[in-house]
Amino acid sequence: MNILVTGGAGYIGVHTCVVLLEKGHTVIVADNLCNSKADSINKVRQITRKEITFYNIDVTDEQALETIFLQHKIDSVIHFAGLKAVGESVKLPLDYYFNNVVSTLLLAKVCLKHQVNRFIFSSSATVYGNNTVPFVETLDPLPTTNPYGETKAMSERVLTDIARTNPSFSVSLLRYFNPIGAHQSGLIGEDPNGIPNNLMPYITQVAKGKLEKLMVFGNDFFTVDGTGVRDYIHVMDLAEGHVAALDNLTEGVHIYNLGTGQGTSVLQLIEAFEEANGVGIPYEIVDRRPGDIASSYANVLKAKRELGWIAKHNIKAMCRDAWRFEKNIEQLRVR
């Protein structure tokens, strides 16, 4: 298939591109590089020894999207493009609503115009809000607690309504949890612009000495040690989950959690990283961030049953792969 991957130069997108190419698909990437780097596309070529087409465009630009669909016979879309930091979304809600919701609206519009009826959407566990864990796909309504989560819930509703009125339009809504780790080659991984918003690249930058210490946001949650609990999943497992959803896509709307089903606290993740890599991580407890919840982890039975997919990597493997990539970053940038 010819697959358009929006946000395909980003962290999750680029790993998914690797799996798609290795499965024999043709991949076209659209990315504005606001939180990614064009060189990641070259690394995908290096890993797979296959060609990949890249467009430096913003998915909120309808005319630019139209150009791609006219240039290529697109069979399926995987929509990753979007802003993704919970804390930032609380400070910049307008940016998040415009970027994340408008991109979904326009992409769906262009898909319908060109009769592209296979759509995989990158949603998030944040749609579940502060609810009882483990989160199950049947939860309704979705009690989001921050603008980022609400943009994902709104986009889900848009795509669901489109599918209801267009019976041939097939949608898979993938609610995934907290991706960490990197490709085993060490060539691609999470490499954010500026100070990281996500926990693992912050840990790896502290381990490397680029940052002085890790800020742990809150130790008074009702969890095993007071720090936030999340379901960390290896990014390559997540990439495989997207391809499994694509391979099993049928008409209608399908919702799947992609996680391990296991919760790990911030302090437990620090400990796992230290044990896996033999590197100490200094940290400081600071106030909670607005919009954060105590615990988030998945019920993953539906994905296993319907997609035949399960996460395979454990938490120490995720930590080892993330650290391998971090140690390689400067060397990769000068090649």
Image (spheres, rainbow, N blue to C red):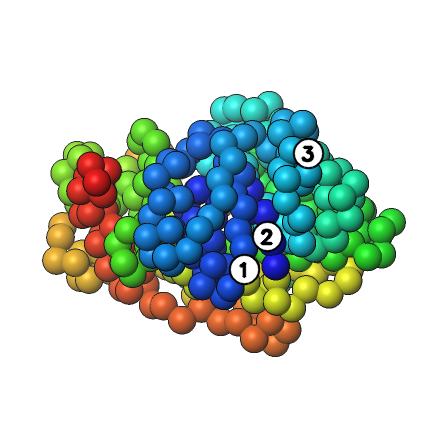
* Residue at 53% over, 71% down: 309
Q: Amino acid at mark 2?
A: Ile
Q: Quadrant of the N terminus?
A: bottom right
Q: Amino acid at mark 3?
A: Glu
Give the secondary structure at mark 2.
strand
* Residue at 74% over, 57% down: 170
- Mark 3 vs mark 2: which is more N-terminal? 2
Q: Amino acid at mark 1?
A: His
Say left or right for 286 vs 281.
Answer: right
Mark 3 to mark 2 CA distance (whole Å): 15 Å
Say left or right for 151 vs 259.
Answer: right
Measured from the top left, where is residue 132 in percent x and y?
57, 58
- Mark 1 vs mark 3: which is more N-terminal? 1
Q: Is residue 295 visible?
A: no
Q: Considering only vertical position in the picture, is 83 above or below 278?
A: above
Whether pointer 1 and pointer 3 mark residues with C-beta atoms closer than 8 Å, the reply is no
Q: Considering only vertical position in the picture, is 185 above or below 145?
A: below
Mark 2 to mark 1 CA distance (whole Å): 7 Å
Residue 247 is marked as: none
* Residue at 44% over, 42% down: 9
Residue 66 is marked as: 3
Mark 1 to mark 3 CA distance (whole Å): 21 Å
Say left or right for 193 vs 172.
Answer: left
- Residue labelled with disc 2: 3
- Residue labelled with disc 1: 25
Whether pointer 2 and pointer 1 mark residues with C-beta atoms closer than 8 Å, the reply is yes
Q: Quadrant of the C terminus?
A: top left
Q: Quadrant of residue 285?
A: top left
